[in-house]
Image: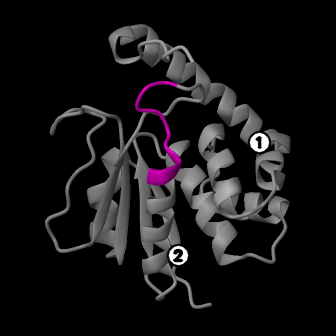
Amino acid sequence: MPAGNITICRADELLDKVAELKPAAVLSIEHPGVKPGESRYSARLSDGTPQMVLTFWDSEQPVPDGPDIDQVARGMAFVMDHITKGGDVIIHCHAGKARSVAIALGVLSQLYPREDEVALVKRLLAIRPIAAPNIIIVGMVDELTGRGGKLLKAVLDNEQITIARGWAEVGRAEYRERNPEKFPPPPKP
């Protein structure tokens, strides 16, 4: 299958990366309710590059407006549509290490369906060594790609990713503490 390359970056690097790489498409992931000019807002491209913007929290616990399998599936399909035609694609979120890398892992799983899950995680780390994939999204991409829990296990078993996920959770906790109004408790079943 012809394939372009995946680049993963932070939101504040996006415009420079687009100018440098001239990608076929950009998948942007931002937090709900951000406004233009705010630090967690994804720049909107005006150069004609196709861009899809997904909106959900980087939370590894169920929260309103958290990761959503339908958005994840749409994002993966968007990337696959461009990358399988040989185009390079940029995937980014605020920090370029949790939501974006989890979706990139799903794309890699589709691009290399015969590779085992450990090899896919190594490919991901070669693209983004600071990868700390959001575990809820990894579970979703595992389901969407029919990996039967093996992709999730490969992520959870990787020591480098485990360390990075620990640091990412510290950042999430600090953000929730500073912004409790954005994270109401989930509805009771």
Q: Please name whichever residue, 156 or 77, is drawn nearer the observer in this view of the structure.
A: 77
Q: Which quarter of the picture shows residue 2?
A: bottom right
State which region is magenta. Answer: 63-71
Residue topped by disc 1: 160
Provide the secondary structure element on which disc 1 rests.
helix
Q: Secondary structure at mark 2?
A: loop
| Quarter in which the N terminus is drawn | bottom right
Q: Is residue 134 visible?
A: no
Kindly identify the amino acid type of the residue bearing the numbered disc 1: Gln
Q: Are marks 1 and 2 in contact (CB under 8 Å)?
A: no
Number of the label disc, if any, that sits on residue 5: 2
Q: Can residue 77 be seen? A: yes
Residue 13 in the image: state x and y as whole percent: 34, 51
Q: For residue 31, what is the image quadrant?
A: top left
Furthest residue toward front: 189
Residue 69 sits inside the magenta stretch? yes
Image side of residue 125 versus residue 174, left or right: right
